[in-house]
Amino acid sequence: MDVVVGKRAWQRDCVSRAIAPTTGSIPVVRREDLVLLKLYAGGPQDGWDIHQLLRLPDGEDIVVAVDALVGNLPSDAQALWLRVRTERSAR
């Protein structure tokens, strides 16, 4: 579990969209917001995690949602998203 302290507006937006699961009271970020947070972190494990999330049955929906939001992230996170999208298209 990670605790997110949002210093930037897009991070606060991710947290504000979090939903409370039916099994507990701690809100969790939506899948597309998790991708945004992982893009921002930018490590090798984060990239792998993003690829795994995009393999889920609703992976294309996640891609569409991230495409709409990624412009709010720093340029290095946007570049990582472009690389992930390119790799995904090549498969």
Image (cartoon, rainbow, N blue to C red):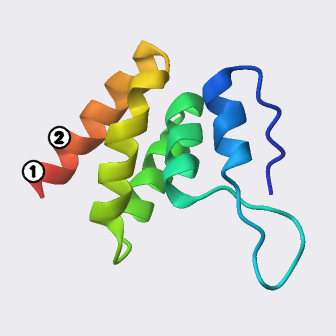
* Residue drawn at point x = 33 percent, y = 62 percent: 61
Kind of element beneath mark 2: helix
Kind of element beneath mark 1: helix
**Residue 24 position in % (x across, y down):** 87, 78
* Mark 2 lies on residue: 86
From the viewer's perspective, tell me whether residue 3 is left or right of residue 71. right
Label 2–label 1 contact, CB within 8 A: yes
How would you rate the neighbour count of disc 1 (Cα within 10 Å): few for under 14, some for 14-19, many for 20 or more? few
Report the residue that reaches farthest toward the bottom: 23
* Mark 1 lies on residue: 90
Q: Quadrant of residue 82?
A: top left
From the viewer's perspective, tell me whether residue 63 is left or right of residue 29. left
Q: How many badges with numbers are in the image?
A: 2
Q: CA distance from mark 2 to mark 1?
A: 6 Å
Three-letter amino acid code at disc 2?
A: Thr
* Vertical placement of residue 10 versus 1, above or below: above
Along the line of sight, which residue is nearer the eye, 51 or 11? 11
* Vertical placement of residue 75 versus 64, above or below: above
How would you rate the neighbour count of disc 2 (Cα within 10 Å): few for under 14, some for 14-19, many for 20 or more? few
